[in-house]
Amino acid sequence: MFLGRKQELNRLNRLYQTKKFQLFILYGRRRVGKTALIREFCQDKPHIFFAAELGNDNANLKKFSAQVLAHYHESAYTDFSSWEKAVLFINERQGDAPLVLVLDEFPYLAESNRGILSGLQHLIDHELQSSRLFLILCGSYVSFMEEEVLGGKSPLFGRRTAQLQLKPFDYLDSAAFLPRFSPEEQCILYGVLGGIPQYLRGIDNQKNLESNLQDLFLTPMGFLYNEPLLLLREEIQQPGVYNAILAAIAGGASKANEIAGKTGEPVAKCLKYMQTLISLGIIKKETPWGEKESSRRTIYRLQDLLFRFWYRYIMGGSVLIESEAGHILWQKKIAPDISHYMGAVFEQICGEYLLRQNSLGSLPFLFTSLGRWWGANPRTKEQVEIDLVAADHNHYLVGECKWRHEKTGLKVLSALKEKALAAVGQGADCRYILFSQSGFTPELKAEADGDRLMLVDLGEIMKQV
């Protein structure tokens, strides 16, 4: 059963209903559901879906030729001598009739035939504009799709009619894959798997959380046991260096010089590698809310939740897993620490909750920026952090996120107000929002007024809109 992506499907169908030529560029990291989205879109429409393979151009063209000729039940033709002639043949056969033509894993084609981009440009400019061809170029190499297909130096620059970088599901869409689990368990599974549909589909709703995670990670046959390493090998040429960088970040290094020191690589070289990891969505560069990207307080964090979980627990536990003692790893290391791990995940979930509420217009004001803040408290001289700051001009919504098995009380609110002064200063229009896994004390509830102070528990966070 196909879950989620309703907005994306609606947009694609609106494009299709224009009855005009379309060049749609779809890209995103592997396993994020690009192919599933396209197949769902195509299922009730005439289409040719071609999945390119890593190999030489002749082999892919031969395979494409066979697929095109089979689509038209044509046996009198031989293989096409070029991609341009194959697309021209399709265009001529279609006439005024619509057709969705999908070239999946397009970077494989472009890397083995550098002329295919300029060939498509020529066809679009001279032959296809008056057609009803819906051409979809799809790829997993994000940097390639952004630079070589969408970039200003690409032959196709300015020809695309729409584009989409498909992102992982957020926490709430992910929960739709996990109907048999409690809200707390749904959050934990999101914190382990992220919003990747293929991983979420690997969860057996008839088993408990522990059994699922052991089956996926804690056995040598587990689907996700080596998944991050496999993804790195698919995407980059020197996985060893990248692996060392990711291990350093997972181990607590957050600044460029700290990461370089742990890997033994020069800072400049590390920054280059980290930029690649950012483009793949594996890590993110973060500065305190309100500061420029060039801030000296810039840090790097693991963004991909699967990578974050794997490098924290699985990478160092391979000896136990390979000796079929993964259950010991769960009992001794993962289970006792999972609440601590979920602290940062819960911050991300709460940020996604705010984004959803903002899009619905359900907050006291419409914010235009959202982030974390850290710095010195000018009164106490201590380093402090604020989990969430949402702002628009001089309006601020400052938030604290508590994933712990006790109710959140007035002390947390008092500390948040103190930190807010350090972040936004005196005289600002400042509101507060507290998120809590376990709810709130009666004393704190008495302070809430729904406008200046908002209290959001796990039930509210996981409520389907």
Image (cartoon, grey):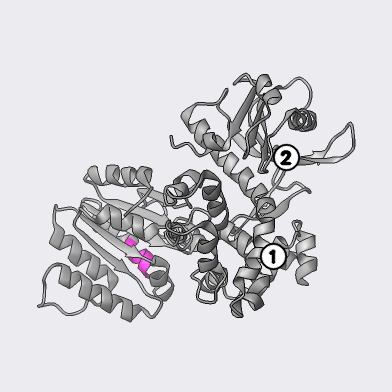
Q: Which mark is residue 139?
A: none
Q: Name the residue at the right extreme.
A: 380
327 part of magenta stretch:
no
Residue at 11% in and 77% down? 75
| Within-10-Å neighbours for mark 1: few <14, some 14–19, many 20+ | few
Residue beneath label 2, please? 373
Magenta segment, principal secondary structure? helix
Specify the segment rendered in magenta: 114-120
Q: Residue 332 carries which label?
A: 1
Residue at 24% in and 47% down? 20
Residue at 50% in and 39% down? 462
Amino acid type of the residue tagged 2 in the rendering: Trp
Amino acid type of the residue tagged 1 in the rendering: Lys
Numbered disc 2: secondary structure = strand
* Residue 295 at x, y percent in the picture: 75, 46
Residue at 69% in and 39% down? 406
The C terminus: image quadrant: top left
Which of the 4 image quadrants contains residue 58?
Answer: bottom left
Toward the viewer: 350 or 15?
350
Toward the viewer: 342 or 19?
342
